[in-house]
Amino acid sequence: MADACKVKDLGRAGGGSAFGRYRALVHGDIAPWRVWRNELLTLLFMNLPGALGLALRQRCYPCMFRQCGRGVVFGRGVTLRHAHKIALGEGCIIDDGALLDAKGSANRGIELGNGVYIGRNTNVYCKNGDIVVGDRANFSANCTLFSSNRLSVGAGCMVGAYCYFLSGGEYDYHDATPFADQSGMCTRGPLEIGADCWFGARVTVLDAACIGQRCVIGAGAVVTKPVPDRSLALGVPAKPVRQV
């Protein structure tokens, strides 16, 4: 992941023109006609309200993605970046104001399984990492999933509002280089979350703090270390207190 760059550097990669920088940031390395097609679809339908907007987005948006299953619903104001590296399973719901951003020069991007729900104003974004979400996982409003390494969330997980899952993206405070000049890509390893977990509101799960299957993480907890299967974990930092 050392070759990854900040957003401002990604913008510079587009060349000298403002459009080139915009294309690198929002669309990535795709043909110009696809850029203009995606721009037109977004202009026409992104903020179109009501049932008509839902129907037209459902009909017209799938061509932008690497894969898009049947019956995917896109809410109003959904922001898509590097959509050609996003795969959506059947019956996904992307609620109003959500962000799906698969940017990166060497990553595969974002994969959402069947029936995944991405809540209102939730951000799912990569910085040269990958994000994989299993079937029927449910993210409430205002969550953030970030990856500069690999973030995987198991099937059937229920995630409360304002949760933050972080895979990579750390800075090296031992390095004298100013933080603004570092890549911000340090990582201790992938973040893997097992199937059938329940996260209360405002849970933070830090880099490489992997969580086993069918765990319950109490509201407001900060998970800094791995949590074994079938554990109830509470506190800051989160510690297992009993078996589920």
Image (cartoon, rainbow, N blue to C red):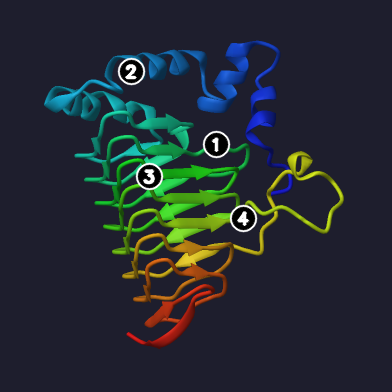
- 3D distance between C-alphas at marks 2 and 3: 22 Å
Which one is in front in this view, the residue at disc 3 or the one at disc 1? 3
Q: Which residue is mark 3?
A: 122
* Amino acid on which the number 3 mark rests in the picture: Thr
Q: Is residue 116 above or below residue 159?
A: above
- 3D distance between C-alphas at marks 1 and 4: 15 Å
Q: Which mark is residue 168?
A: 4
Which one is in front in this view, the residue at disc 2 or the one at disc 4? 4
Q: Secondary structure at mark 2?
A: helix
Tell me: 186 left or right of 199: right
- 3D distance between C-alphas at marks 4 and 3: 19 Å
Q: Which mark is residue 103?
A: 1
Where is residue 217? Give x, y as percent: 39, 72
* Amino acid on which the number 1 mark rests in the picture: Lys
Which residue corresponds to the image point at 69% horizontal and 47% vertical from the top-left? 184
**Of label 1 and label 2, which has the lower sequence position?**
2
Tell me: 15 left or right of 237: right
Q: Secondary structure at mark 4?
A: loop
Q: Residue furthest left?
A: 51
Q: Which residue is mark 2?
A: 41
Tell me: 210 left or right of 229: right
